[in-house]
Image (tube, coloured by chain):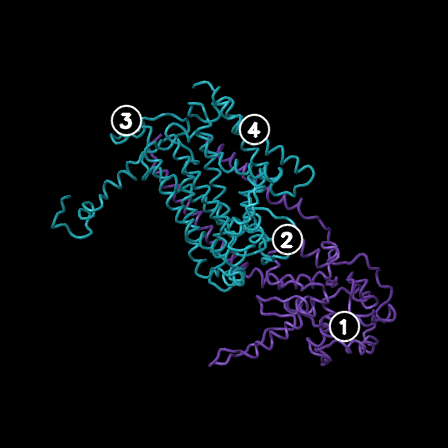
Chain colours: A cyan, B purple
C-alpha cells in the first residue's frame, strides 16, 4: 500500500503526485523524453499528423450533429443543411474534406521520410509496423467517410470496392452481399459505413496512435545521420548544462517549440486550401446524388488510393487482385526485406539510393495513371509502372544484402 | 540551408503530384469544347431590321399558347394542363427580349427545331418571313425590362424543366407555403401541390426521354467551362441530348450562373470574408512560434 499524506489538500500537487505520479509522468513523457538534436522539419510531421487528426475529429463532431445516415436524406443533409443552413457548417465541412485529403499527403511524407532515413530498422521495427497499421486504418476511415455524402462517386466507389471481396475467380458473391447487407449498396450499407466511420475505426485509430507513440519511447526517434546515440550519456550532459555539446534535446519545450512553428506554417497552407482551393479534395462527380441507374463515365478513387488502384487495373481480374493484395501488405514487410545493417540516409547507401527515388517516382507515375482512363499509351505506362513496382520490391532484399557496411 | 533544400524537394514532388491528378488528369478525361461567347456563329446575320409596331400585331398569334404577364396577358392554360397538352409548359414571354440573343431569337421563330438542335420541339415555326421574325423580336425587345434578376433569368430559361429544390423551386413554380392540420399533421394543400408537380414531371419525362436533373448544386458538380459551353450548345458536350439550345446572350447566361452559384455554393461570400482573418491569424501564430523557437534553441548549436 502506498503512503498517502492525510493532510495533503485535495488536488494539490502533492495530492496528485501521490495518486497519479504526475512528476514522473511529466519527466518520462515530456521534459526528459530525449530527442536527437540532429533532425530537420520532417521530424515534425508526426505532430502535424496529430494536429490534422485533431482537426478531423473536431470538425467531424460538428458535422455529426447534422448529418443524416439515410439514403434519402444524406445528400441534402450534407449539401444543403450543413452547407447553407448551419452556421459555419460550410467551414467544418471544408476543414473535414480538405483535412481528409491533406492527412494522406502528410502520411506519405512521413512514410517516405522513414524510408529515406532507415527509421524502420534496428529496434524501430514496431514503430514502422504500428505506423503502417495506422495507414491502413486511415484508409478505412477515408473510404467509409467517402460513402457518407451518398453522391455518385460514393455509391459507385462503394460498389467497386466491395466487389473486390468476391475475390475474382472465387466468386464469393455471398461475402460481398454480407458486407453490403444487401445486393447493392443501399440503406444497410450506408448505416454500417456510418458506424465504421464515426465509431469503430476512429476508436481503433486512437488506440493505435497511442501504440505508435509507445513504440517510439524506448528506441527513440532516428536522426538525420542514422547515428546510434547513447541517450543516457547525452541526457546527463544536457542536464549538466552542456546543451551545446549534448546530442539530445528534451521533447518539451525544445523539440516542441520547433514542432509548433512547423505546425503554424502548415496551418497557413492548410487554411489557404480550406478557403480558396478545396476543389482537389471534393470531387465534382460526388455533387451528383447517387443514382444506381447511371454509372459515371470515369470512376476513380481519391488521389491517395490511385497508386494501389493502378497496381490492380492493368491485369486480368485474378492476377490484378493478387497484385492489389501484394501492394497492400508489402510495405509492412519493409523492415525485414531490407537486409542491410546500415541505418543511414538513402544518399549514403549505394544502390538503395536509386531504389528509394525509383520507388517514389514509380508510385507517382502509378498515381497519375490510376486517374487517367485506361486507354492506349496510358494503359501501357500503367502496366510498366505496376511491373516496376513489383520488380523494385523483389530487388530490395538482393541489393540491400549486397550493401557495404558503413 | 539544408532544411530549405529538403523543403524544396518536398514542395516540388507535391506540386508534380497535384498537377498530375488534377489539371492534367482532368484535361485528359474531358473533351475540350471551344465556346463561342454566346454569339451563335452557325446562324447567319439578319438581313433586315425589325419594327416593334408591326411585331406587336404579329404577337397576337403567340398568346394562343404563351403568357406575357408584363403586358397583362395571362396563360391560356395552367402549367400542368399545358404539360399534358404539349409535354412541357410554354414559357412566359415577358423577359425573352432581355435574355435571348437577337439573331438566335429570329431564326428560332423561323425554325425552332433546327435552331434549338432538339429532335422534337413542340413549338411550330412561328414567323412567315425573316421580316416577320425580326419584327416580333423587336417587339419583345421593346417590352423587355431593363434589369432582370438572376432568379427571373433561371425561371424563364431553365425553370420549366429543371427544379431547384435548394431554392424551393419546382417546374410549376415556387413551393407554396401551406399549413398542416394541427390535430393530424396532414397537410392536404402540400400533398395536392406535390401531386401536381408529380403529374407535370411524369409528362415532362415522357416528352424529354428522362426527367431533366434538379440544378440545385450543379455549379459544384460541373466545371465552369462545361456549364458555359453546354448551355451555349448542349450537343457540343452531350451529343444526342434532348436539351434544346436556349439561345441566351452572354449576359443572360451570367445571370443564370449567378443564380446557380447562389443556390449551389451559398458560402462563397462568407468564405471570402472569413478567409483572410483565419489565414492572418495563423501567419501571426507561425511568426510568434518562430520567435519562441529561436529563444528556446538559443545556445543549442
Chain bearing mark 1? B
Q: Which residue lies furthest to the top in this view?
A: A404
Rounded to the nearest angstrom, the CA distance separating label 1 from label 2 is 43 Å
Q: Name the residue under label 1.
A: B140
Q: Where is residue B180 in the image (x, y as percent from the top left)?
A: 51, 79
Q: Residues within 10 Å of mark 2 (few under 14, many from 20)?
A: few
Closer to the eye: label 3 or 2: 2
Q: Position of residue A126 (x, y in %)?
A: 38, 34
Closer to the eye: label 1 or 2: 2
Rounded to the nearest angstrom, the CA distance separating label 3 from label 2 is 64 Å
Which structural element holds mark 2? loop
Q: Mark 3 points at which residue?
A: A233
Q: How crowded is mark 3: few (under 14 residues within 10 Å), some or many (20 or more)?
A: few
Chain bearing mark 3? A
Residue at the image point whose x is 55% and y is 61% from the top: B266
Which structural element holds mark 3? helix
Closer to the eye: label 3 or 4: 4
The quadrant of the rendering that contains the C terminus of chain B is top left
Q: How crowded is mark 4: few (under 14 residues within 10 Å), some or many (20 or more)?
A: few
Rounded to the nearest angstrom, the CA distance separating label 3 from label 4 is 43 Å
Q: Are marks 4 and 1 on the same chain?
A: no
Q: Name the residue under label 2.
A: A295
Amino acid at each position: 500500500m502506498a503512503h498517502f499524506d492525510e493532510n495533503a489538500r485535495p488536488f494539490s500537487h502533492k495530492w496528485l503526485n501521490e495518486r497519479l505520479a504526475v512528476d514522473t509522468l511529466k519527466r518520462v513523457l515530456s521534459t526528459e523524453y530525449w530527442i536527437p538534436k540532429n533532425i530537420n522539419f520532417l521530424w515534425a510531421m508526426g505532430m502535424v499528423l496529430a494536429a490534422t487528426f485533431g482537426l478531423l475529429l473536431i470538425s467531424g463532431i460538428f458535422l455529426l450533429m447534422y448529418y443524416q445516415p439515410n439514403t434519402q436524406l444524406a445528400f441534402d443533409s450534407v449539401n444543403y443543411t450543413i452547407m447553407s443552413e448551419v452556421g459555419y457548417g460550410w467551414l467544418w465541412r471544408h476543414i473535414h474534406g480538405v483535412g481528409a485529403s491533406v492527412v494522406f499527403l502528410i502520411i506519405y511524407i512521413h512514410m517516405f521520410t522513414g524510408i529515406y532515413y532507415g527509421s524502420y530498422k534496428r529496434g524501430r521495427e514496431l514503430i514502422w509496423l504500428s505506423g503502417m497499421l495506422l495507414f491502413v486504418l486511415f484508409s478505412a476511415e477515408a473510404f467509409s467517410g467517402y460513402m457518407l455524402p451518398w453522391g455518385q462517386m460514393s455509391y459507385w466507389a462503394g460498389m467497386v470496392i466491395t466487389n473486390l471481396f468476391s475475390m475474382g475467380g472465387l466468386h464469393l458473391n455471398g461475402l460481398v452481399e454480407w458486407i453490403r447487407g444487401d445486393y447493392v449498396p443501399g440503406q444497410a450499407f450506408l448505416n454500417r459505413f456510418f458506424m465504421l466511420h464515426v465509431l469503430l475505426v476512429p476508436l481503433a485509430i486512437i488506440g493505435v496512435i497511442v501504440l505508435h507513440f509507445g513504440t517510439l519511447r524506448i528506441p527513440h526517434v532516428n536522426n538525420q545521420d542514422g547515428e546510434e546515440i547513447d541517450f543516457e550519456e547525452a541526457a546527463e550532459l544536457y542536464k549538466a548544462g552542456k546543451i551545446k555539446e549534448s546530442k539530445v534535446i528534451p521533447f518539451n519545450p525544445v523539440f516542441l517549440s520547433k514542432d509548433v512553428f512547423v505546425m503554424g506554417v502548415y496551418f497557413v497552407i492548410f487554411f489557404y486550401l480550406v478557403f480558396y482551393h478545396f476543389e482537389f479534395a471534393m470531387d465534382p462527380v460526388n455533387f451528383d446524388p447517387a443514382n444506381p441507374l447511371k454509372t459515371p463515365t470515369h470512376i476513380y478513387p481519391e488521389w491517395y488510393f490511385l497508386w494501389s488502384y493502378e497496381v490492380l487495373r492493368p491485369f486480368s481480374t485474378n492476377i490484378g487482385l493478387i497484385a492489389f493484395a501484394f501492394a497492400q501488405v508489402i510495405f509492412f514487410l519493409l523492415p525485414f526485406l531490407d537486409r542491410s545493417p546500415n541505418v543511414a540516409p538513402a544518399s549514403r547507401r549505394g544502390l538503395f539510393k536509386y531504389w528509394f527515388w525509383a520507388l517514389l517516382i514509380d508510385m507517382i507515375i502509378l498515381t497519375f495513371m490510376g486517374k487517367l482512363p485506361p486507354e492506349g499509351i496510358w494503359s501501357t505506362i500503367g502496366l510498366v509502372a505496376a511491373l516496376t513496382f513489383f520488380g523494385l520490391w523483389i530487388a530490395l532484399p538482393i541489393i540491400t544484402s549486397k550493401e557495404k557496411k558503413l | 540551408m539544408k532544411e530549405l533544400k529538403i523543403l524544396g524537394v518536398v514542395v516540388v514532388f507535391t506540386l508534380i503530384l497535384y498537377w498530375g491528378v488534377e489539371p492534367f488528369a482532368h484535361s485528359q478525361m474531358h473533351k475540350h469544347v471551344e465556346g463561342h461567347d454566346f454569339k451563335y456563329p452557325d446562324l447567319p446575320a439578319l438581313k433586315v431590321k425589325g419594327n416593334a409596331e408591326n411585331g406587336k400585331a404579329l404577337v397576337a398569334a403567340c398568346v394562343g399558347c404563351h403568357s406575357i404577364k408584363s403586358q397583362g396577358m395571362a396563360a391560356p392554360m395552367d402549367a400542368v394542363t399545358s404539360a399534358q397538352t404539349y409535354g412541357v409548359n410554354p414559357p412566359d414571354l415577358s423577359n425573352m427580349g432581355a435574355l435571348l440573343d437577337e439573331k438566335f431569337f429570329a431564326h428560332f421563330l423561323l425554325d425552332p427545331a433546327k435552331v434549338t438542335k432538339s429532335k422534337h420541339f413542340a413549338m411550330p415555326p412561328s414567323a412567315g418571313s425573316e421580316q416577320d421574325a425580326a419584327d416580333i423580336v423587336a417587339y419583345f425587345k421593346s417590352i423587355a425590362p431593363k434589369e432582370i434578376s438572376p432568379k427571373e433569368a433561371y425561371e424563364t430559361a431553365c425553370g420549366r424543366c429543371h427544379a431547384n429544390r435548394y431554392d424551393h423551386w419546382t417546374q410549376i413554380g415556387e413551393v407554396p407555403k401551406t399549413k398542416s392540420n394541427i390535430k393530424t399533421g396532414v397537410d392536404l394543400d402540400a400533398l395536392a401541390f406535390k401531386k401536381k408537380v408529380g403529374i407535370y414531371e411524369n409528362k415532362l419525362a415522357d416528352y424529354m426521354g428522362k426527367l431533366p436533373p434538379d440544378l440545385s448544386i450543379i455549379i459544384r458538380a460541373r466545371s465552369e467551362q462545361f456549364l458555359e459551353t453546354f448551355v451555349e450548345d448542349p450537343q457540343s458536350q452531350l451529343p444526342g441530348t434532348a436539351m434544346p439550345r436556349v439561345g441566351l446572350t452572354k449576359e443572360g447566361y451570367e445571370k443564370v450562373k449567378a443564380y446557380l452559384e447562389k443556390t449551389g455554393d451559398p458560402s462563397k461570400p462568407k468564405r471570402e470574408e472569413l478567409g483572410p482573418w483565419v489565414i492572418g491569424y495563423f501567419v501571426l501564430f507561425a511568426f510568434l512560434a518562430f520567435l519562441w523557437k529561436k529563444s528556446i534553441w538559443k545556445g543549442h548549436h
